[in-house]
Image (tube, rainbow, N blue to C red):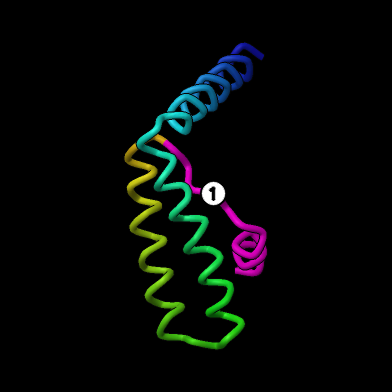
Amino acid sequence: MVADLEAEIARVKERAAAKEAKAKPEVKPFMAAVKAVDKALAAAKDAEADGVCHALETARATLGEQLIAMGVRAPVTRERKKSEKAA
């Protein structure tokens, strides 16, 4: 029971740290860029532009790595959630 409570405390502290990191002004442009890439990726998939999809996925991965380095989790879109469940 104590271990469960300690684990919950650790999760709450992680969420609080992530919330603080997300509020930093230098993080906001990266979050906006990830969201823009997600929208462009959805449009490229609708247009069946495989080359563009690959380039956008690479860009998103790079932006996601930077966000992780800043202590923030990259946003997950509904479409990305669906593809992760299917895989």
- Left or right of 32, for residue 45: right
Query: Does residue 68 lie above or below 87 as drawn?
Result: above
Q: 3 or 7, which lies in front?
A: 7
Q: Quadrant of the N terminus?
A: top right
Q: Based on the picture, tell me whether residue 17 belongs to the magenta stretch.
A: no
Name the residue located 53 percent from the left edge and 79 percent from the top edge.
44
- Left or right of 4, for residue 23: left
**Magenta-drawn segment:** 72-87
In x, y percent, where is residue 4? 63, 20
Q: Which residue is mark 1?
A: 75
In x, y percent, where is residue 43? 57, 76
**Element marked by disc 1:** loop
Name the residue located 51 percent from the left edge and 70 percent from the top edge.
40
Residue type, numbered disc 1? Pro
Q: Residue furthest top?
A: 2
Q: Based on the picture, tell me whether residue 79 belongs to the magenta stretch.
A: yes
- Left or right of 72, for residue 87: right
Name the residue located 40 percent from the left edge and 52 percent from the top edge.
64
Q: 87 or 26, which lies in front?
A: 26
Query: Does residue 26 lie above or below 82 as drawn?
Result: above
